[in-house]
Image: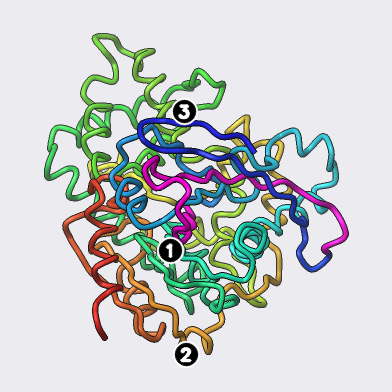
Amino acid sequence: MTTSRHLGTVHVDHTFTVPLDHNRPDDQQIQVYAREIQATGQAGRDLPWLLFLGGGPGAASPRPFGGEGWINRALRDYRVLMLDQRGTGRSTPVDRRLLAQIRDPGAQADYLSHFRADAIVRDAEIIRRTLIGDRPWSVLGQSFGGLCTITYLSFAPHRLAQAFITGGLPGVCATADEVYRALYPTVTLKNTEHYDRFPGDVDQARAVARYLHDHRVILPSGRPLTVKTFQALGNMLGGTDGSLRLHYLLEDPFTGGTEPSEAFLYQVERELADVAGGPLYYLLHEATYAQGMAATRWSAQRIRDEFPAFDAEAALGSGAPILFTGEMIYPWMFDTDPVLQPFRPAAHLIAERPAWPALYNIDRLRNNTVPVAAAIYHDDMYLDRGLSLSTAQIIHGLKPWLTDEYQHDGLRTSNGAVLEHLLALINEHP
């Protein structure tokens, strides 16, 4: 363990060895990293633990710089453990080096199948037992971390003292098709709101799309900037400042010239790179919704065909606005992105995988006894409000907070107010 101090906090690094496949605990092992954080004034006190499960899949836990409101609020009552979920951050990575070790696409797909919420929860249980033995701890799940939290409540609820969820309450009975069928209208609404706010961006986006339709443009990374790639920038529209960032990106994409400027291309590259820390996000995104005997079969692409307004070529022909897409993964991404291309065969095998283990135990959720509070954001672009509310009705005792005050990243942007509200909810008398 390594200990460091930063702005009134003490950080302790932990690394744990866990099985790749928890059903075969004596086979291949991987490393999982977690950062313990405690307020300097609380050091040495036996505070309860709060496990933080962050967004993703495939994203490392946020690196604290000091001053994060929700962390400061949590440290008043808890010792916080920020987990780099398997395959991310300082845990054993999933990246192109994996392909040098596992050359067969089928074996790659099998390996990657062990990086979903069920395995993450079983990692957390090894970590909990190592740190505090039989004592339970609390968990805070943001976005994908919320999905992991519901899996935790399904399969090891007796190990949880409390559960907090922010923007991460999934439709526990919904298929991938149902998830995307619910999300595309919300993405359409986010586009409408953006263009209402910045009407000049309609023509700017059309000008960029027209140029990309007629010319081959390469980003600094070597990835082609196609019309579809340009549309994928809409993923930022679900964040608090996303619409403004998109507007600034579109302010002057040609910068006095007749082709996209270098500054514009570098900014596009940064925005696309910010979506995820590595290929795991793209490889397992739809698999986060997969349960039972049903392949996802590139659900986001298939369901997109039900919403023709997202057809940019048709929009260019008709004069309609170019609609940006949201948090959807499409098969063409593995054709065009140099980072993802080596994973293309495995990605298709994962999409066609015919069976997945269950992520949720509905009967156990209906009989839940763990105190749970969940923030549901009214216009969340990443988790459908209706599906979240339906799950809130399933989980016994869950206290939902439906709010239009914050976007999906409200935990980060609210200066601790979202966590404060959930703490108050969970401590209320029934």
**Cβ atoms under marks 2 and 3 closer than 8 Å:** no
**Quadrant in which the C terminus is drawn:** bottom left
The quarter of the picture where residue 400 lies is bottom left
Q: Residue at x 24, y 9 (%)?
A: 256
Q: Is residue 238 visible?
A: no
**Cβ atoms under marks 1 and 2 closer than 8 Å:** no
Q: Residue at x 47, y 54 (%)?
A: 52
Depth check, mark 3 against mark 1: the one in front is 1
Q: Identity of the amino acid at label 3?
A: Leu
Depth check, mark 2 against mark 3: the one in front is 2
The image shows residue 222 at horizontal and vertical percentages of: 56, 21
**Helix or strand or loop: what does disc 3 sit on?**
loop
**Quadrant in which the N terminus is drawn:** top right
Depth check, mark 1 against mark 2: the one in front is 2
Q: Is residue 71 visible?
A: yes
Q: Earlier in the sequence, mark 3 or mark 1?
A: 1
The image shows residue 284 at horizontal and vertical percentages of: 60, 54
Q: Earlier in the sequence, mark 1 or mark 2?
A: 1
The quarter of the picture where residue 376 lies is bottom left
Q: In the figure, is residue 98 to the left or right of 407?
A: right
- For disc 1, the marked residue is 180
- For disc 2, the marked residue is 367
The image shows residue 330 at horizontal and vertical percentages of: 53, 49
Disc marking residue 371 = none
Q: Identity of the amino acid at label 2?
A: Asn
Disc marking residue 225 = 3
The image shows residue 423 at horizontal and vertical percentages of: 29, 65
Who is closer to the viewer here, 325 or 421?
421
Q: In the figure, is residue 329 to the left or right of 105?
A: left
Q: In the figure, is residue 33 to the left or right of 177?
A: right
Q: Is residue 42 magenta?
A: yes
